[in-house]
Image (cartoon, rainbow, N blue to C red):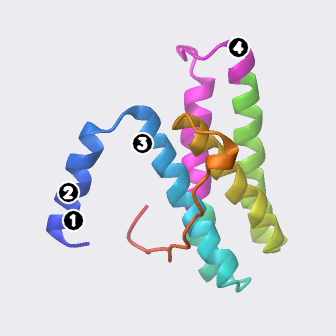
Amino acid sequence: MQPAIQAYNKTQTLVLSQRELEARALLKAASKLQWLKENWEPSIATMDDPLNHNRQVWTIFLEAATDPQSPMPPEMRSNMIGLCRFVINQCMRMLFEPDPKKLDLMIEINQHIAAGLRGREGSDLPKTEARKPEMAES
Protein backbone atom coordinates (compact mmCIF):
# COMPACT_ATOMS: atom_id res chain seq x y z
CA MET A 1 0.00 0.00 0.00
CA GLN A 2 1.28 3.47 -0.83
CA PRO A 3 2.46 5.67 2.08
CA ALA A 4 -0.13 8.39 1.35
CA ILE A 5 -2.97 5.86 1.44
CA GLN A 6 -1.60 4.35 4.66
CA ALA A 7 -1.44 7.80 6.29
CA TYR A 8 -5.03 8.55 5.20
CA ASN A 9 -6.27 5.21 6.55
CA LYS A 10 -4.51 5.82 9.87
CA THR A 11 -5.98 9.32 10.21
CA GLN A 12 -9.43 8.07 9.23
CA THR A 13 -9.23 5.37 11.90
CA LEU A 14 -8.47 7.95 14.59
CA VAL A 15 -11.65 9.95 13.94
CA LEU A 16 -14.15 7.11 13.50
CA SER A 17 -16.39 5.86 16.27
CA GLN A 18 -15.89 2.35 17.63
CA ARG A 19 -19.20 1.26 16.10
CA GLU A 20 -18.19 2.59 12.68
CA LEU A 21 -14.82 0.84 12.88
CA GLU A 22 -16.56 -2.43 13.73
CA ALA A 23 -19.05 -1.95 10.88
CA ARG A 24 -16.24 -1.28 8.42
CA ALA A 25 -14.33 -4.34 9.60
CA LEU A 26 -17.41 -6.49 9.04
CA LEU A 27 -18.05 -5.02 5.59
CA LYS A 28 -14.42 -5.53 4.58
CA ALA A 29 -14.70 -9.17 5.66
CA ALA A 30 -18.00 -9.50 3.76
CA SER A 31 -16.33 -8.01 0.70
CA LYS A 32 -13.54 -10.57 0.82
CA LEU A 33 -16.06 -13.39 1.25
CA GLN A 34 -18.08 -12.04 -1.69
CA TRP A 35 -14.93 -12.04 -3.82
CA LEU A 36 -14.26 -15.65 -2.81
CA LYS A 37 -17.81 -16.62 -3.77
CA GLU A 38 -17.57 -14.90 -7.16
CA ASN A 39 -14.11 -16.39 -7.86
CA TRP A 40 -14.79 -19.77 -6.33
CA GLU A 41 -11.89 -22.17 -6.24
CA PRO A 42 -11.91 -24.65 -3.36
CA SER A 43 -8.20 -24.44 -2.58
CA ILE A 44 -6.55 -23.38 0.66
CA ALA A 45 -4.56 -20.74 -1.23
CA THR A 46 -7.75 -19.05 -2.44
CA MET A 47 -9.92 -19.53 0.64
CA ASP A 48 -7.36 -18.82 3.37
CA ASP A 49 -7.25 -15.00 3.34
CA PRO A 50 -11.00 -14.28 3.18
CA LEU A 51 -11.88 -16.93 5.76
CA ASN A 52 -8.99 -16.05 8.05
CA HIS A 53 -9.85 -12.35 7.89
CA ASN A 54 -13.49 -13.04 8.76
CA ARG A 55 -12.47 -15.36 11.58
CA GLN A 56 -10.10 -12.72 12.99
CA VAL A 57 -12.83 -10.06 12.99
CA TRP A 58 -15.23 -12.37 14.82
CA THR A 59 -12.52 -13.47 17.26
CA ILE A 60 -12.09 -9.83 18.28
CA PHE A 61 -15.85 -9.56 18.84
CA LEU A 62 -15.78 -12.79 20.85
CA GLU A 63 -12.98 -11.46 23.05
CA ALA A 64 -14.95 -8.26 23.68
CA ALA A 65 -18.14 -10.19 24.50
CA THR A 66 -16.38 -12.54 26.93
CA ASP A 67 -14.51 -9.74 28.70
CA PRO A 68 -15.82 -9.57 32.28
CA GLN A 69 -15.71 -5.75 32.01
CA SER A 70 -17.94 -5.75 28.91
CA PRO A 71 -20.71 -3.14 29.19
CA MET A 72 -23.12 -5.34 27.20
CA PRO A 73 -26.23 -6.60 28.99
CA PRO A 74 -25.96 -10.33 29.88
CA GLU A 75 -28.52 -11.51 27.30
CA MET A 76 -26.84 -9.53 24.52
CA ARG A 77 -23.44 -10.89 25.57
CA SER A 78 -24.77 -14.43 25.47
CA ASN A 79 -26.29 -13.91 22.01
CA MET A 80 -23.11 -12.29 20.72
CA ILE A 81 -20.93 -15.09 22.07
CA GLY A 82 -23.15 -17.67 20.34
CA LEU A 83 -23.08 -15.76 17.06
CA CYS A 84 -19.29 -15.32 17.23
CA ARG A 85 -18.76 -19.01 17.85
CA PHE A 86 -21.10 -19.93 15.00
CA VAL A 87 -19.31 -17.68 12.48
CA ILE A 88 -15.84 -18.80 13.59
CA ASN A 89 -16.92 -22.45 13.29
CA GLN A 90 -18.40 -21.80 9.83
CA CYS A 91 -15.05 -20.37 8.70
CA MET A 92 -13.26 -23.47 9.93
CA ARG A 93 -15.80 -25.83 8.35
CA MET A 94 -15.35 -24.15 4.98
CA LEU A 95 -11.72 -25.27 4.96
CA PHE A 96 -12.74 -28.92 5.43
CA GLU A 97 -16.06 -28.90 3.58
CA PRO A 98 -15.73 -26.19 0.89
CA ASP A 99 -19.11 -25.01 -0.40
CA PRO A 100 -19.67 -21.54 -1.89
CA LYS A 101 -23.31 -21.60 -0.73
CA LYS A 102 -22.10 -21.46 2.89
CA LEU A 103 -20.54 -18.07 2.18
CA ASP A 104 -23.96 -16.45 1.67
CA LEU A 105 -24.90 -16.77 5.32
CA MET A 106 -21.58 -15.37 6.56
CA ILE A 107 -21.81 -12.45 4.13
CA GLU A 108 -25.38 -11.75 5.22
CA ILE A 109 -24.53 -11.91 8.94
CA ASN A 110 -21.65 -9.46 8.45
CA GLN A 111 -23.85 -7.08 6.46
CA HIS A 112 -26.71 -7.15 8.97
CA ILE A 113 -24.50 -6.68 12.02
CA ALA A 114 -22.68 -3.81 10.24
CA ALA A 115 -26.04 -2.20 9.39
CA GLY A 116 -27.13 -2.54 13.02
CA LEU A 117 -23.90 -0.91 14.20
CA ARG A 118 -24.63 1.96 11.85
CA GLY A 119 -28.24 2.19 13.03
CA ARG A 120 -29.78 0.98 9.77
CA GLU A 121 -32.55 -1.49 9.04
CA GLY A 122 -31.94 -4.67 7.05
CA SER A 123 -33.73 -3.27 4.01
CA ASP A 124 -31.27 -0.37 3.97
CA LEU A 125 -28.22 -2.58 3.40
CA PRO A 126 -25.76 -1.58 0.70
CA LYS A 127 -24.73 -4.26 -1.78
CA THR A 128 -21.35 -5.69 -0.82
CA GLU A 129 -18.77 -5.19 -3.54
CA ALA A 130 -16.43 -8.11 -4.03
CA ARG A 131 -12.93 -7.17 -2.92
CA LYS A 132 -9.95 -9.26 -3.89
CA PRO A 133 -8.02 -10.31 -0.79
CA GLU A 134 -4.61 -8.70 -0.42
CA MET A 135 -2.00 -11.00 1.03
CA ALA A 136 -0.22 -8.30 3.10
CA GLU A 137 -3.43 -6.72 4.41
CA SER A 138 -5.34 -8.00 7.43
The vertical placement of 30 against 63, above or below, is below
Callout in the foreground (2, 4): 2
What range of the chain is rendered magenta?
53-77
Q: Residue 103 appears in which quarter of the rendering?
A: bottom right
* Mark number displayed over residue 5: 1
Tag 3 residue: 21
Horizontal side of 124 relative to 86 (left or right) equals left
Please state which of residues 118 and 107 is positioned toward the viewer in this rendering: 118
Spot the residue most to the front: 123
Q: What residue type is labelled 2?
A: Tyr
Q: Which of marks 1 and 3 is nearer the N terminus?
A: 1
Question: Considering the numbered disc 1 on the image, is that residue within a helix, a strand or a loop?
Answer: helix
Horizontal side of 89 relative to 120 (left or right) equals right
Q: Which amino acid does label 1 sit on?
A: Ile
Tag 4 residue: 74
Q: What residue type is labelled 4?
A: Pro
* Mark number displayed over residue 38: none
Q: Earlier in the sequence, mark 3 or mark 4?
A: 3
The reply to whether callout 1 and callout 4 are in contact (CB within 8 Å) is no
Q: How far apart are marks 3 and 2 (CA)?
A: 15 Å
Q: Distance between the residues labelled 1 and 2?
A: 5 Å
Query: Which quarter shows the N terminus?
Result: bottom left
Q: Which of marks 2 and 4 is nearer the N terminus?
A: 2
Image location (x, y in percent) of residue 31: 56, 65
- Is residue 28 found inside the magenta-colored segment of the image? no
Horizontal side of 85 relative to 54 (left or right) equals right
Tag 2 residue: 8
Q: Which residue is drawn at 65% across and 13% down?
A: 73
